[in-house]
Amino acid sequence: MAVSIAAIFESRFYTVCEFAWKSYWKRWRKAGIIFYHVVASCLTLLFGFLAPDQETAKRNMFAKLPCLPQYIYDANNYVLCEDYTYHLLTLVVLGLSALFMVLLFTALLMWNAVVQLKRRTMSQRTFQLQKTFLIALGIQVSVPLCAVALPAIYLWVALVLYYYNQAFTNFAVCSLSMHGFVSSTVMTLVHRPYRETLFSLLPKKVTARSEEHYFKRFLRYNRDVSVGVVTS
């Protein structure tokens, strides 16, 4: 997911920005994107090969946990790791690298817009369109990311501290499993073409009520940027 988020911002940078060195970036961007995806995939695929002997790992795991219901002991459990050093380092490195690229491409997008505005090669209206679209893109990425990051952090802390709470664990798993639904919903609501298509399928009363109470301010702020993106 982190790799895909970085690729979204790179695509926006490549489409919008005009720098003197863009020709060099164009030459190497496809190879760089493929390399980044391959490295991230290989690092995470190693998780499966580093899994310990299951009988020994289960015995050690249950010895560290509090007394649990019998159905948990009887379930088909799988222990991914006992020493989580490699897993933690891999996730931290991938997360930080994706965060660095997102911030870098965002800064380049803003810099490019400001430079073009000062050179009068971009109108104030176009600048506002790009700014608003970038905000919508940030919302599209950050909301689903929080739906994954927060429960993942809890699960990792619970793993490190050997803390067990079935209610919190169920909530974390449900939140993680809803990532696809949350991503699709946010993308549909923050971008006008998708939003209007969705509302056109709803009854008129429901559509009017939704726009009035939930999206009136955002529609007014985001309308122009989506039109500019579609026409471009």
Image (cartoon, rainbow, N blue to C red):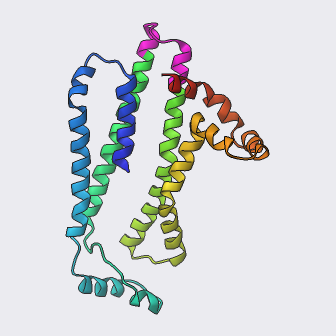
Q: Residue at x 20, y 31 (%)?
A: 28
Q: Is residue 108 visible?
A: no
Q: Indicate whether residue 129 is drawn in magenta.
A: yes
Left or right relative to 158: residue 212: right
Left or right relative to 10: residue 121: right
Q: Is residue 33 visible?
A: yes
Q: Residue at x 36, y 33 (%)?
A: 11
Left or right relative to 231: residue 50: left
Tell me residue 147's x, y (percent). Answer: 50, 56
Q: Quadrant of residue 110?
A: top left
Farthest residue toward the top? 120
**Compared to 64, does 34 lie above or below?**
above
**Compared to 205, does 135 lie above or below?**
above
Q: Quadrant of residue 227?
A: top right
Farthest residue toward the front? 201
Q: Quadrant of residue 57?
A: bottom left
Taking depth in this image into account, of 36 and 57 the one nearest to the observer is: 36
Secondary structure mostly seen in the magenta stretch: helix
Q: Residue at x 25, y 54 (%)?
A: 41
Tell me residue 174's x, y (percent). Answer: 52, 66
Taking depth in this image into account, of 97 and 71 the one nearest to the observer is: 71
Tell me residue 53's x, y (percent). Answer: 21, 81
Q: Residue at x 60, y 34 (%)?
A: 192
Taking depth in this image into account, of 149 and 217 the one nearest to the observer is: 217
Residues rendered magenta in the picture: 115-130
